[in-house]
Image (cartoon, rainbow, N blue to C red):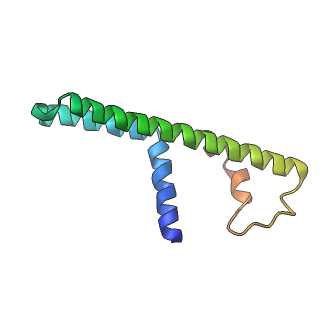
């Protein structure tokens, strides 16, 4: 179960990466070049749905990272990090990679 959770987390992070939009554009161009006959309004609607899905995923990921950074700052400011013991939660990772939170 943990492996599936980690896999889905990685997939969500990759979908929120700006490169996912590039992959969508490359896919659309290749679809247009190699199968022009099937590139109709249905294809356009499909690409728009994929684009909106990636856009929503990116916004959710960015909001989640910002919220986590705020919670980390509040915990560190109050000195509660030493007193909180949550299984599976590492507070040391948040201090080492703050730039990753603002992707």
- Residue 83 figure quarter: bottom right
| Residue at image point 26% right, 34% down | 28
Left or right: residue 90 versus residue 16 is right
Question: Relative to the observer, which residue lies in front, 42 or 24?
Answer: 42
| Residue at image point 15% right, 32% down | 33
- Residue 60 figure quarter: top right
Left or right: residue 24 versus residue 32 is right
| Residue at image point 47% right, 58% down | 8
| Residue situated furthest bottom in the rendering | 1
- Residue 25 figure quarter: top left
Please tell me how many numbered marks the rendered image carries.
0
Left or right: residue 52 versus residue 100 is left
Residue 3 in the image: above or below residue 54 = below
Is residue 40 visible in this depiction of the protein? yes
Instruction: Give the percent coordinates (x, y) of residue 91.
Output: 74, 58
Instruction: Give the percent coordinates (x, y) of residue 88.
Output: 67, 67
Question: Relative to the observer, which residue lies in front, 50 or 25?
Answer: 50
Is residue 22 visible in this depiction of the protein? no
Instruction: Give the percent coordinates (x, y) of residue 48.
Output: 34, 31
Instruction: Give the percent coordinates (x, y) of residue 103.
Output: 57, 39
């Amino acid at each position: 179960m943990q492996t599936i959770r980690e896999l889905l987390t990685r997939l969500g992070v990759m979908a929120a990466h700006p490169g996912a939009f590039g992959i969508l554009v490359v896919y659309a161009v290749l679809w247009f070049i190699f199968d022009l006959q099937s590139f109709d309004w249905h294809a356009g609607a499909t690409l728009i749905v994929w684009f909106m899905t990636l856009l929503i995923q990116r916004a959710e990921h960015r909001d989640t990272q910002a919220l986590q950074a705020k919670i980390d700052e509040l915990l560190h400011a109050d000195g509660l990090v030493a007193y909180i013991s949550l299984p599976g939660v590492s507070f040391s990772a948040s201090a080492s990679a703050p730039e990753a939170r603002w992707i």
